[in-house]
Image (spheres, helix red, strand yellow):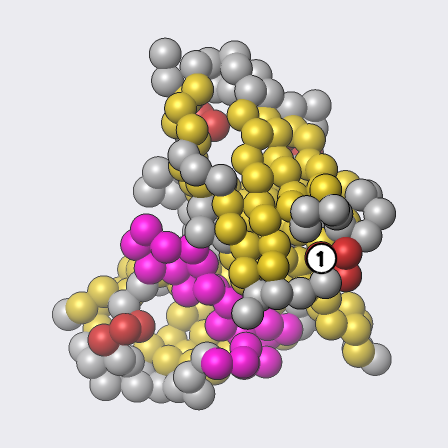
Amino acid sequence: DIQMTQSPSSLSASVGDRVTITCRASQSISSYLNWYQQKPGKAPKLLIYAASSLQSGVPSRFSGSGSGTDFTLTISSLQPEDFATYYCQQSYSTPSFGPGTKVDIK
Amino acid sequence: QVQLVQSGAEVKKPGASVKVSCKASGYTFTSYGISWVRQAPGQGLEWMGWISAYNGNTNYAQKLQGRVTMTTDTSTSTAYMELRSLRSDDTAVYYCARDSVYSSSSGKYNWFDPWGQGTLVTVSS
């Protein structure tokens, strides 16, 4: 099975900050990588699919990049509604998720 | 709009079974698969398995093989997930999600969107 790791596990940031979250796969997964946002008590929401494609309706301040084993989710200017936990997920083989990165208010 | 609506919370005793439903609307049910994902309290996301709403083919996570069964009823556009021999560590929120696929020259990409609202299953004596 493919193991996914994320760093950092949590971060504190201010509104307007640029935030970068990293996801790493235990083997190459090409661009088979998705990102989700989850707020407390809510279901996850798709942000990015196929490593860099922005899901319809998701603000353009979210972007994804990477291929192979290393991937990045970037929020260009953090907004109050972006405080949440972010998960990466590989779809190269049996789906698996990263452990999550919690973004909270500094 | 595309929507998945799940059944309500359940409380079960160890050893019992639970069956969670997921009713789809706003799209052609048989054109997509449904995946089930669970989240234990304060923990991350765990993929449980997938079912094709087109032909009923399934693919289950190895750790749940023998305890989980996923089915669909195309007449009502509803997917079901049954988990048997419940243990305390099965306590979790269970989500269904539409398994979307995009095929291009570079490959076939899958993602989960949208998700149901979640169903809390509590296993306690």
State the residue at coordinates (42%, 84%): A59
- Residue range in magenta is A34-57
Left/right placement of residue B20 relative to residue A37 reads right
> What residue is shown with label 1?
B29
State the residue at coordinates (84%, 47%): B55
State the residue at coordinates (32%, 51%): A41
Q: Whole-percent x and y of residue B15?
A: 52, 12
Nearer to the camera, B98 or A13? B98
Nearer to the camera, B108 or A45? A45
Count of numbered circles in the view: 1
Quarter of image, res A102: bottom left
Vertically, is A72 above or below A2?
Answer: below
Q: What SS does tag 1 mark?
A: helix
Q: Is residue A55 magenta?
A: yes
Nearer to the camera, A43 or A2? A43
Q: Residue most toward the left?
A: A106
State the residue at coordinates (61%, 29%): B82
Q: Whole-percent x and y of residue A70?
A: 56, 69
Left/right placement of residue B12 relative to residue B69 reads left
Q: Whole-percent x and y of residue B41?
A: 35, 38
Task: Specify the subunit that label 1 lies on.
Answer: B
